[in-house]
Amino acid sequence: MSVSVFMKILESSPSRYDMGIRILTFGMDMEVKKKIVSEYISEGDHVLDIGVGTGTLAVLCAQKGAYVFGFDISSKMLEIARKKVKSAGLEEKVHLEEMSVVEMDTHLKENSFDVVVAALVFSELSETEQIFTLKQCYRVLKPNGRLIIEDEVKPKSLRKKIAYYIVHLPLALITYIISQSLTKPVKGIEKKLSEAGFEIESCFKFFYDSLILIVARKVV
Ligand SMILES: C[S@@+](CC[C@H](N)C(=O)[O-])C[C@H]1O[C@@H](n2cnc3c(N)ncnc32)[C@H](O)[C@@H]1O
């Protein structure tokens, strides 16, 4: 299932984003987010949520007792996130800001987060932005802090690849017609993580190997 090609459509209508992602991933996206929170977030953690979107993961982290700084380039997505945070009574725990990954170097202090999460975001960044963002993640994490990436990748086996293209190509065309833009599955993320100084702890695959969850640690 190709999720990323639909993201642009869903983001152009943020009020439908949560429902759309739930349907597109058959609820798997929420399961992955719950796994992130239950296994990698602890009470009192300082968490950076890159491309926080409508705030689903930020709210789950804050409900576990973490302090979350979430940022996103889209004011519309942030509007939904703010409503969600308010209705959950978590305004003391979640701080949201409109900014881009390219501002991380000037807006965020080094060694200041226990965990950085980036869910379905790297697939929307250019190669240069991905490399820059990984370096910034390394800089802002405390020593031994974790970077957790959930994103879409192309499956490796031929059978899964064929299934992926059968679904992906028509969706890509529809997305392009509607939004004049395309997203792409992330490529070579493990290599980029190593080059940025991270040590990969775990890599989980879901959804016919097209959705990955990578847990990497800042080793010093
Ligand atoms: C597919 S959504 C994922 C949202 C959320 N993390 C989730 O898992 O539901 C991708 C988000 O990344 C944001 N985004 C894309 N490019 C960005 C950039 N350069 N800087 C910050 N956020 C960005 C988009 O606005 C969008 O909200």
Image (cartoon, grey):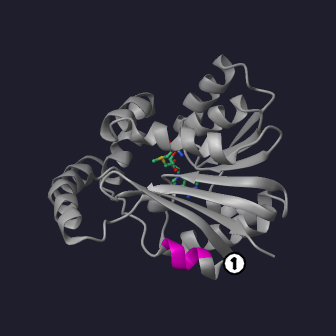
**Where residue 93 sits in the image (x, y, percent)?**
78, 32
- Residue at 59 percent across and 35 percent down: it is 55
- Residue at 56 percent across and 77 percent down: it is 192
- Residue at 22 percent across and 57 percent down: it is 168
From the viewer's perspective, tell me whether residue 147 is left or right of residue 165.
right
Mark yes or no: residue 13 visible. no
Residue 17 painted magenta: no
**Where residue 183 sits in the image (x, y, percent)?**
37, 59
Magenta segment, principal secondary structure? helix
Q: Residues within 10 Å of mark 1 (few under 14, many from 20)?
A: some
Screen quadrant of the C terminus:
bottom right
Mark 1: which secondary structure?
loop
Disc 1 marks a residue whose amino acid type is Gly
Mark yes or no: residue 83 visible. yes
- Quadrant in which residue 132 is drawn: bottom right
Residue that protrudes farthest toward the bottom in the picture: 195
199 to 16, vertically: above or below? below
- Quadrant in which residue 118 is drawn: bottom right
171 to 66, vertically: above or below? below
**Where residue 187 sits in the image (x, y, percent)?**
42, 72
Q: Which residue is disc 1 drawn over?
A: 197
Looking at the rendering, the stretch of residues picked out in magenta corresponds to: 189-193
From the viewer's perspective, tell me whether residue 200 is left or right of residue 76.
right
- Residue at 59 percent across and 32 percent down: it is 81
